[in-house]
Amino acid sequence: MAHKNMVVEKTVNYIEAHLDEEISLDKIAKDLNYSKFYLARVFVKETGKTIYKYVQGRRLTLAARELVETQKPIVEIAYGAQYQSQQAFTAAFHQLYFCTPQKFRNNGVFYPRQSRIHMRMGYGSHTNCRLGGKIAA
């Protein structure tokens, strides 16, 4: 169990360090020295989502922060999030945030939809830890 958490943690660290670059399952697996099939299977099992969905969610969350905190043109934010067009970015953003990037910017309130995954040794990501009678998220 702890080994799988370590694999996920290494993968998340790699993704976080390369979010502004072109990243693929093949590249991650090669750079971390794992089989892409093993890496994909362990990541889904431990986190409940695919590596692709995690990367997409993280990029869109960082883009959402930029929308609120900067005046960068939306197309520039879209390219920075590794989208080939503003239209593709808008469609993906709408799917995650349920509004357009422009509307999100106009609302002026940032909230993350995909936070960084942190694995705790000894606990899977689907395990709730009971502390003092309350469930810790």
Image (cartoon, rainbow, N blue to C red):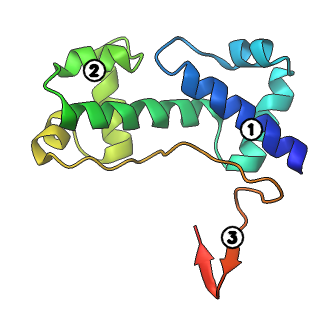
On residue 77, which mark appears?
2
Most extreme residue toward the left is: 106
Q: Residues under labels 1 and 3: Cα distance? A: 18 Å
Which of the marked residues, 2 or 1, is nearer the chain's N terminus?
A: 1
- Name the amino acid type tagged 2: Ile
Image quarter for residue 83?
top left
**Spatial separation of the CA atoms under disc 2 and disc 3:** 36 Å
Compared across the picture, whether 109 is left or right of 125 comes to left
- Look at mark 1 in the image and give the residue it sits on: 8
Q: Is residue 9 left or right of residue 83?
A: right
Q: Is residue 131 visible?
A: yes
Mark 1 secondary-structure assignment: helix
Question: Seen in the image, is 37 located left or right of residue 12?
Answer: right
At a point 37% along the width and 11% down the height, the residue shown is: 84
Residue at 80% over, 35% down: 7
Q: Quick check: 108 left or right of 98?
A: left
**Residue 104: percent from the left, percent from the top?**
19, 42
Query: Mark 3: which secondary structure?
Result: loop
